[in-house]
Amino acid sequence: MISSPDPHIIYQVSHGVLVLQINRPDKKNALTQTMYAALAQGIVAADKDDDVNVILIRGTEDCFTSGNDVNDFVKTPDSGTERPSVQFMKAIGHARKPVIAAVGGLAIGIGTTMLLHCDLVYAAEESFMQLPFTRLGLCPEAGSSLLLQQIVGHQRASELLLLGERFSAQKAREYGIVNEVLPAAGYLEHAMNKAHELARLPADAVQTSKALIKRNQAKPLDDIITTELTEFARLLQTPEAQAVFQAFLNKKSRA
């Protein structure tokens, strides 16, 4: 298995499971573009590695990820090439091997939208999620405008995406975003046990079954991600979004 190109994304292979750990607790596991690149690279490498049958994404014990690192997001120039964050969206959306998420604490923005691509999601009972895009003057990303309504239905997707309020792990389970909610002391162990159980099953059968489940999703998912990115870039230039981001940067500079 290749090594991670970013120190805040840890790769560890355990009995056929590649664990991708987001490990930047001093910044609430906020994701930079180099961290996105490392996550994407890990998923792509796992898909090519015969010794890996399952991918598990986790954060630290009490935080999954608070979403994008705003300072990095604003300062990283758009080079005209595909941003690492988009590479990650596509990598997780097209992963051949099962992807499991173990969620503790914050799961904000991409921390929630990436769960919609995962095949199994286990969350700590104290964790909560949020899709705050409209509150930032922005729109959904990572294919969430398509996937969320497929999972939870139109009205519930509208509740979560339009209002952008925080919601509990229990509500996420009720809505079908999370498979199980567990005590904080046991959610990660439970997710790892499920990952190892899945890794022991015949790999070809598991991957074929996943491909069949997602067979009608690939093309519309790529299309909606492209559309979301276009609208996201447009909205990012609006006075409302600029004001939100400037206020955040001013607050950080005074801290």
Image (spheres, rainbow, N blue to C red):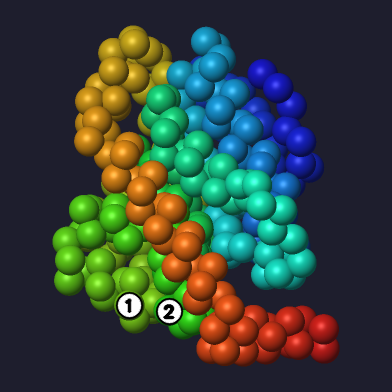
> Does label 1 or label 2 sit earlier along the sequence?
2
Q: Position of residue 29 (x, y in %)?
A: 65, 58
Q: Position of residue 121 (x, y in %)?
A: 37, 45
Q: Position of residue 230 (x, y in %)?
A: 47, 62
Comparing 215 with 102, the one in front is: 215
Residue of label 1: 162
Q: Residues within 10 Å of mark 1 (few under 14, many from 20)?
A: some
Q: Position of residue 45 (x, y in %)?
A: 59, 24
Give the quarter of the figure containing the C terminus.
bottom right
For image coordinates 65% across by 47% down, the residue present is 81
Cα separation between marks 1 and 2: 6 Å
Q: Is 40 drawn above or below residue 145 in the view shown?
A: above
The three-letter code of the residue at mark 2 reads Thr
Mark number displayed over residue 134: 2
- Residue 169 visible? The answer is yes
**Residue 237 occupies quadrant:** bottom right
Where disc 1 sits, the SS reads helix
Q: Residues within 10 Å of mark 2 (few under 14, many from 20)?
A: some
Comparing 72 with 7, the one in front is: 72
Tell me whether the residue at label 1 lies in contact with that at label 2, contact meaning CB atoms closer than 8 angstroms.
yes
Where disc 2 sits, the SS reads helix
The three-letter code of the residue at mark 1 reads Leu
